[in-house]
Image (tube, rainbow, N blue to C red):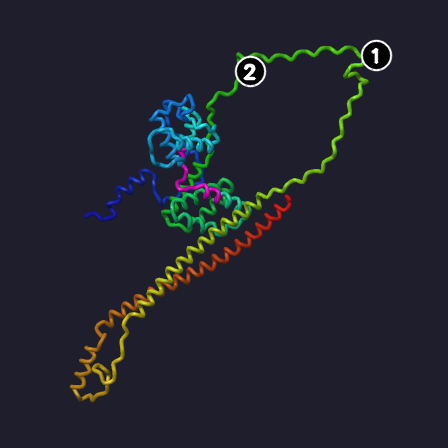
Amino acid sequence: MPRFSSLFTPIRQSLLERSYNPFESFDPFGPLDEERRKRRPVSLPLTAPVGPAGLAETRNRAGDVGRVEGALGRAGILGRERRRPVFDTRLETGVRDFQRRKGLRVDGLLNPGGPTIKALGRVLARPPLKGLSGAAVSANTRLVRHLMTTTADGMVPGLMAADFGTDEAGRAKTADFLSQLFGRDPARARSLRAKARGMMAADEKGLLDKLILQARLADEEDDPTPDEPEDPTPDDPGQDDPEEPPEEPEKPPYDPGHPQPGDPDDPEPEEPEEPDEPPKKPKPDCSEEEEAVAAAQSELEAAEAEQGRINEDIKEKQAALDDLKEQIASLPKQKPAEPGAIGQSFPFRLNDPRAWLLWALGQLVRPGTLNEGEDDSIRRDREKKAEELKKEIDALKEKLKSLESEADEIRQRLAGAEARLAECKSQNR
């Protein structure tokens, strides 16, 4: 009979042939040339223009509308549910939203081979991270700006590892943060990635690198694709030469007896003097102070959320410990025999065989003797579990104490940033 592990050999070989290995480590911050070649734009052929019904050029054929709806769903602009192939308000809103994000003309129209359908094909080749919300992107941007003002990493690596281990949204947020940071400071991004990977499981490390690469590709600017011919230059054949300006008429000779405007002795009109205005005081730029406040608030929220999670763990483990203590206390205890009862150790004569026989019988029939070994085993097992729970609670309390000190430091930094922001804004008054 083959070994159980050998049954998975074909599956493992198939995955390796497809270049997928969750435990494989690679550099997600390397050049993207090879990945760009692998991810060529997706072709989305349209037979006729698709767009709002009010436009004369739109045809909105069912196949074209369904193709556009499916592409917008895969790009994360619309939901993945499919409806009737009709260009309704929902679909028009999605097209306009996509055009707005890509800096295209916002008209809701998709022409065959036009700029909107080409941009959509490029996005499908580099899909965005699943679960990434706009709020998470904004929070990452604020945190990256804050890290540019300091060399201390603080709680960032631990929070990254914690977010990555929660759910799909947390994994997407972590990968987007490292992608944004790499655009500002590649060395810092590599350092934080290494620290976060040290707190992750082996399969999470490979997944993190894969998501970072996907985030970098999704964040890349689209290559400009001119869809309209450039304006012809003046040197192109067939262009008319610009007309020469007409010659100015000659002025008559200067005659003192017949003054004319512009004569040498014609005094120039004096321009009225404008009153001197006091120079305007430039308004100070408080953007750095605002970013510092936002970054400190984001760190404080994350620290307080981690404290709340640890407090919940402590409560659960303390309740389990109390329950174990009650179970231990409820176990039956051996009671001492009453004076004169059978089974009590009592003095007797060594040469009295009847006394020996009665004492031996009393030890066998003593209440609780038969279950005493089993009860002791249960007691020892529960006492061991209670000791382990107590150690876990003590470790969580130590971690909570460390988090509280870090949160206090963040609050002090936040108070200082808010004071600097208030002082900066007071200069505008």
> What segment carries the magenta color?
123-140
Amino acid marked by disc 2: Asp
Residue 165 percent location from the top left of the image:
39, 49
Q: Is residue 128 covered in magenta?
A: yes
The residue that mark 2 highlights is 235
Q: Nearer the viewer, residue 3 or 287?
A: 287
Residue 276 percent location from the top left of the image:
74, 35
Residue at 24% over, 69% down: 374
Say which element carries label 1.
Answer: loop
Query: Which numbered disc covers residue 358?
Result: none
Residue 189 percent location from the top left of the image:
48, 44
The residue that mark 1 highlights is 257
- Disc number lying in front (2 or 1): 1
Say which element carries label 2.
Answer: loop
Amino acid marked by disc 1: Gly
Let me know if residue 215 appears in the view: yes
Mark positioned earlier in the residue sequence (2 or 1): 2
Left or right: 82 with respect to 215?
left
Q: Is residue 59 covered in magenta?
A: no
Q: Nearer the viewer, residue 403 or 422?
A: 422
